[in-house]
Amino acid sequence: MKKIHWGILSTGKIAGSFTEDIRYVPDAEVVAVGSRNQHTAEAFGQKHNIPKRHPSYQALANDPDVDVIYIATPHAFHAENSIICMNANKAVLCEKAFCINAGEAEKMILSARENNVFLMEALVTRHFPVIHQVLDWIKDGLIGEVRIVQANRCAREEFTLESRVVNPELGGGSLLDLGIYVIGFSSMIFGQPPQKATGFGFIGDYGSDEQGASILEYDNGALAILTFALRTATVNDAYIYGTDGYIKIPDLFAVPVVATLHINGQKEVEFEKPIRGNGLHYQVQEVHRCLREGLLESPRLPLEESLQIMETMDKIRSSWDLKYPNDENNLF
Ligand SMILES: NC(=O)c1ccc[n+]([C@@H]2O[C@H](COP(=O)([O-])OP(=O)(O)OC[C@H]3O[C@@H](n4cnc5c(N)ncnc54)[C@H](OP(=O)(O)O)[C@@H]3O)[C@@H](O)[C@H]2O)c1
């Protein structure tokens, strides 16, 4: 089978982990990296054994040897970076959060459609085998009707303006960096956008949200109760409660290795699937499946859903009166 050639756009933390995990996908090959300067491209290329090292993102986008590009810049640049790649006819896998607001998401989707290229948000959780099992349990009716989802996603980040997770100019804040996991999870379980969103966010000294909690209401009063935080050491677990039982995905639910099914009055059932590396290769396999089948988006995470998730985050943010400095940017 002809290998699919990847380009890596940027050279930060997750770009390194992703490049390492690609080795678990036999028909994938990383052929190029692009950075904002030659020096970092060279260093990254050397470390990860990547032959072509470009001194700009545009040069990577223009590389004729590349089939698909992985975008791993801070959120504030996802839209612009994805669009230059799609305009150069490249398929794109763009890190979460997809971008910073629904207006940008619409522009990205329009670009994918106009250029007739594949685009997917790298929301890793839903590509893990444990999640496929959880969705099967729900589809088979084993916990009855799903009524409540509860999930927490928190981290202890270094709290300085230099950090992309803190700096508002880079799209920093707990909602876009960590809230995306719990909101994306709830969206996957309920398969629809919420009708209402309420909650609170605490805006810290640097102008970004340090922590937040949201309650989302779905059809027929189903609820999601979600927390996300940059400085609070909570457990990172998820529960799906139905009328006949519940499913638990323990810490770290976003990178799941085990889930348990609890049906009222019965012994719990456990499904475990240890991961290799960081587990980022599952989404690469999904991109390959789509590209080989000629799909322009993934049925596991359609573009309309990425847009709806962004709209939900916009709603949550507007209820806190939180704006990003580049919210109003007219990109193009
Ligand atoms: N899926 C996951 O599990 C996961 C985990 C962590 C992060 N992420 C996502 O991946 C993205 C990157 O996260 P990260 O933790 O890898 O970030 P990071 O370590 O800060 O790296 C970001 C990279 O983006 C490039 N960049 C372009 N413009 C920049 C600017 N103005 N300031 C800083 N860097 C800039 C830089 O690469 P060059 O210098 O080479 O241009 C930099 O190394 C985020 O959107 C994040 O949400 C996903």
Image (cartoon, rainbow, N blue to C red):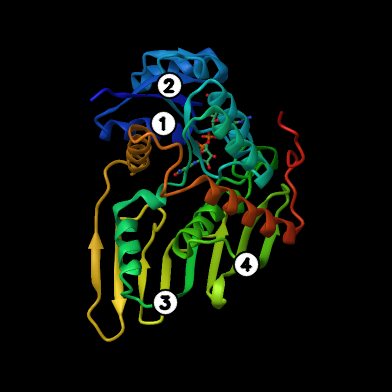
Q: Is residue 82 left or right of residue 202?
A: left
- The image quadrant of residue 78 is top right
Q: Which residue is mark 1?
A: 16
Residue at the disc numbered 3: 145
Establish if 310 lies above or below 296: below
- The answer to whether residue 113 is visible is yes
Dot 4 amino acid type: Gln
Helix, strand or loop under label 2: helix
Q: Earlier in the sequence, mark 3 or mark 2?
A: 2
| Secondary element type, mark 3 | loop
Which three-letter amino acid code belongs to the residue tagged 1? Answer: Gly
Q: Residue at x 22, y 80 (%)?
A: 267
Whether pointer 2 and pointer 1 mark residues with C-beta atoms closer than 8 Å, the reply is yes
- Of the 4 image quadrants, the one containing the N terminus is top left
For label 4, the crowd category at 10 Å Cα-Cα, with few meaning under 14, some 14 to 19 and many 20 or more, is few
Circle 4 residue: 195
Instruction: Tell me what residue is drawn at x 38 percent, y 60 percent.
Output: 251
Q: What whole-number distance in Å separates the C-alpha atoms at marks 3 and 2?
A: 48 Å
User: Within 8 Å: ligand 1 and the Cβ of disc 2?
Assistant: yes
